[in-house]
Image (cartoon, grey):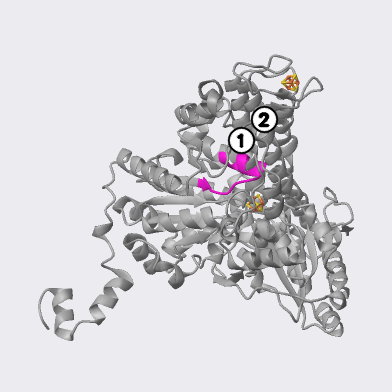
Amino acid sequence: MAKKERTMDERTIDPASKEMLIRADELGLGTAFHRAEAMPPCNIGAAGMCCKFCGMGPCRLTKDGSTGVCGATIDTIQARNLVRAIAAGSAAHSDHGRDMAFTLKAVANGETEGYVLRDIAKLRTVAAFYDIPIEGRSPEEIANDLADLYIAQFGQQKGELAPIRRATEKRQKLWRELGVVPRGIDREVVESLHRTHMGDDQHVPHLLEQAVRTSMTDGWGGSIIATDIADILFGTPAPVVGQANLGVLKDDMVNVVVHGHEPLLSQMMVVASQDPEIIEYAEAAGAKGVNMSGICCTANEILVRQGVPAAGNFLQQELAILTGAVEAMVVDVQCIMQALVSLSENFHTKVITTSPKVRITNATHIEFNEHKALTIAKDILKVAIDNYKNRGETQIPDVRSDLVPGFSHEYINYMLGGTYRSSFRPLNDAIMSGRIRGVAAIVGCNNPRSTQDHFHTYVTKELLKQDVLVVETGCGAIAAAKLGLLLGEAGLDKVGPGLREICETIGIPPVLHMGSCVDNSRILTVLTQMAEEGGLGDDIDQIPAVGLAPEWMSEKALAIATYCVASGAYVIFGGSSPLSGMPDRVSDSDLVLNYLSVEWENLYGGKLEFINEADEMVQKTLEHIDKKRAALKLPEYDASKFGKSGDARMGELESLSFEEQQKALYGVPA
Ligand code: SF4
Ligand code: MSK
């Protein structure tokens, strides 16, 4: 395929990103956008038709009926590639959860610096769920037991993962009947690697069953663990005001951007940045203080809790450095491009790795340790402050949007019913009446092979017009934030009449930002509680809801998609399919793709499909929602029935005379 340089509008819809890409071109510097254009994807690998699992290969199965040297068919190779990707994605999310669990244990035993058990109510709720005694015990004692239980999930060899019990009764029964309940997190990931070694599992349904079992160690294992503990240590999110996009960087302050996933260090850096010692140190360096911001899911972790601004999503990590205004980019794990380091050499930015698991050649390494978290956070900030004097010419795009993130499932429950009547009943009722047609979870990454933020925001906007309530996490949520969709008033003129009434009545934006990519576990919880509330069937597969990752790129995304399918959801992935096969070998290479849609739907009530066109994603979402509404015997969606209450009704009444108002309200003049 020939190299193709795209126009700026084809690269991104975000004006701040465009400005930085122009700057990159002027400076002659490359970014992921440029590299994606210079290196078209390998069409054999992209279609899942390459195997390099042993030294007899790599084998490329490009001819009809061909097999690898060992005889492996294209179906086996595609299924094995998928299982390995899901194992890697599950390992990433789960290892994040493991670090959180060890930190909880250390906090409970007074062995850390700077952390506290912040949300005791959540600690007690979670512990009680697992029958850990709570009455008459200190938070530390409860946290110690919870940490032990969560740590045990990783090395458990037999039995069932404990958080599985948080699914509906019906779903648990189905999983047990199908034999896909994970035994232990590490065990399933190891078994996936074993099964996909040369000469092992070579039967597509059997491989894909292990894909499901492994993915569940993520969604119903490591991710739930990570979310629970982040809430216990740093607080369960509730709405806060925040900002997003590169314009949150400040010319007169030391800019420190945290990037990656685990909130352990980033939360402590937020605390340290407000310490008088650090502010004084920054002022002595000639700055007004330290300006913290985030990229990717670390951004989401501190945005949903403290309202710390997000400098951008995945594809903006290099663009932040291109502003010339970032003193330090502090990274931990996942989604960190190696190119950051070579790019930063053109500026003064220090890229600082902090995880014992992640080093990057030529980056500065300051290793994080939860036992000295606050001290290390301050040390890192001092390195950034010392670097302020080296700043050269800067160009910070004057582009930022306000947003209100922080919609944890606990908050959604509370906001719908208040302290004494917290419940999902009003949400279920709104769906049953048709005011809300259904729910879409739009999540996941950016990918330089599609137009940055375009698919996320196009699909979001179109579904909102159709009265679909949207919940978001990860880089998709930051995309919507940049478009102003995470604000009450700013977003409401763009939504359908029924959804608008609900948003106005409750006082919420039409798009609810629920957190980082491990916080997709919150979406599972919301859907489970909606099913348990009644009126929308008794399991997730009956709820009029769809999950979408319109610009996916990471192996974690494939793990998320698979555990959502196993939980009963219809999942749509945009962009390329890693299983597409060769166009002229449709029947031969479609077995795995068909299995993911048709057979998984038969087994789990959920399915995974790869759809390239944004309008088709919208259409398939609405078709699925309407199909589920019909199966529940709910009234057919009819937008014309709504929009006559809430603010719209008030506006209408205000334009009338007093007599006309009385007539409109009571049918008689005053
Ligand atoms: Fe080729 Fe089989 Fe080795 Fe894969 S496992 S590289 S298909 S010989
Ligand atoms: S950070 S996994 S690009 S959502 Fe979670 Fe964003 Fe995707 Fe990384």
Q: Residue furthest top?
A: 71
- Relative horizontal placement of residue 634, taking residue 152 as reference (left or right): left
Asked whether 9 or 82 is in front, the reply is 9
Asked whether 215 or 383 is in front, the reply is 383
| Disc 2 residue: CB within 8 Å of ligand 1 | no
Region in magenta: 548-561
Q: Secondary structure at mark 2?
A: helix
- Relative horizontal placement of residue 196, taking residue 56 as reference (left or right): left
Residue 63 percent coordinates (x, y): 62, 20
- Is residue 287 on the magenta stretch? no
Q: Which mark is residue 137?
A: none
Asked whether 60 or 427 is in front, the reply is 60
Q: Earlier in the sequence, mark 2 or mark 1?
A: 2
Give the labeled residue for mark 2: 81
Give the vertical position of 50 relative to 166 (above or below).
above
Labels 2 and 1 touching (C-beta < 8 A):
yes
- Mark 2 crowd level (few <14, some 14–19, many ≥20, 10 Å Cα): many
Residue 70 percent coordinates (x, y): 73, 15
Residue depicted at x 50% and y 27%: 594
Q: Secondary structure at mark 1?
A: loop
Residue 224 percent coordinates (x, y): 62, 47
Count the labels in the image. 2
Residue depicted at x 48% and y 37%: 568
Q: Which mark is residue 578?
A: 1
Distance of label 2 from label 1 (alpha carbons): 9 Å
Give the vertical position of 164 relative to 28 (above or below).
above
- Callout 1, which amino acid? Pro
- Locate ligand 1 by image quadrant: top right
